[in-house]
Amino acid sequence: MTLPPLVAPVDALSDDERARTARHHVLAGLGEHGQRRLRAAHVAVVGAGGLGAPVVLALAAAGIGTITIIDDDVVELSNLQRQVMHRHADVGAAKVDSAVRVASELSPETVVRPLRERLTRENAAELLAGAHLVIDGTDTFDTRLEVAAATERLGVPLVWGVIQEFAAQVTVFWSAPPQGADAVVLADLYPPGSVGELPTCAAVGVFGALCLQVGSVLAMEAIKLIAGIGDPLLGRVMVIDALRARTSEVPLRPARATAPSMPTPPAEIMIADLEEEMRAGALLLDVRERVEVIGGMIPGARHLPLDEVLTDPGALEAERIVVICQVGARARRAAAALCAVGADAVVLTGGMVAWNAEQAR
């Protein structure tokens, strides 16, 4: 469903900006009028890392008038594998400084407001003040909760994306959308208490090129909302499986309206319990990808990739199943699907990361 544009257009573009953005002007539905809306827009980007970096590049190139970039971190050498806004010479410098540089080099008329601060509950409203739209590119769920809460209070749309290993999710949350559209917020996707301790990218890795893809989608969703074109991801979650080059979509409805009963999360066991499970005859099921298990599996485990488990969870015949992945996220999805068809499935807490740490002792 196409939504009304977020902002009124500026009166006119400069000659240089009209020439620079000429390919937008001939796009059906966007045109020069839409480009003038982009020039009038103020977008706040929280996080200047793997997602925030390509977002800033894309927004500046698109001609967004004002970009506020919020990040308190400095560039590290290991960032350069995926945070494409930064360069080797930036190591040790503030990440927000890169945003100022690249935006001016791409779009001299774009104003960048660098805020070298960590967004918190106390300062969120002040940091996001004046933004028509917010893009969340942060890397901890605690910060994501604060960003979401702030946008809900402000009533502005939140373009949201998350990456872990080779997988990603992208959607749009909006607590006060235009009439005719349902309000969808973060709690509809992740109800309070449903998210445990998530692994960092340092622990499980992140596919660098996927950051560019997801960052591009985040920027496109922002542009569509600002200009009032296309069908934004409000009420839908895009799910990307980079290893299998698959993109799917999951509907997202307001939990407040439908009040569905939430399934009980699958039980989990610790590494210390694994030996007893094996003696009792439990099936150890490794749901990682084929390229991952080359590096080793728990002895006696059976390998079946997650997508094959989800395709036919009833095909596994075992009285007890211990599901294993790299850290636990995929194992929880698999175990939930198995439990839904009546299997007795549990998750190995910490997955292969915990197993390997135990073996190294």
Image: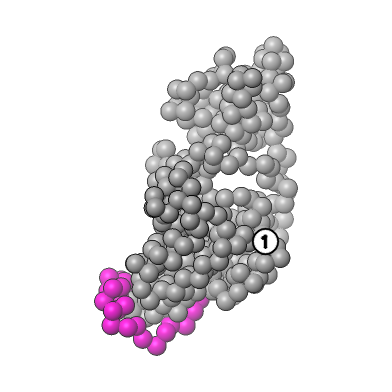
* Residue 147, position as x, y percentages in the image: 63, 61
Which x, y percent locates residue 39? 41, 77
| Main secondary structure type of the part rendered in magenta | loop
**Residue 7 lies in the magenta-colored region:** yes
The crowding category of the residue bearing disc 1, from other C-alpha atoms within 10 Å (few below 14, some 14 to 19, many at least 20), is some
Q: Is residue 37 left or right of residue 258?
A: left
User: How many numbered discs?
Assistant: 1
| Residue position marked by numbered label 1 in the rendering | 120
Secondary-structure class at tag 1 = loop
Range of magenta residues: 5-30
Whether 71 is drawn above or below 207: the answer is: below
Q: Is residue 139 above or below residue 128?
A: above
Image x and y of residue 176, in percent:
63, 71
Identify the residue at image location x=43%, y=54%: 90
At 42% from the left and 47% from the top, the residue drawn is: 80
Q: Residue at x 41, y 38 (%)?
A: 244
Q: To which quarter of the image does residue 332 belong?
A: top right
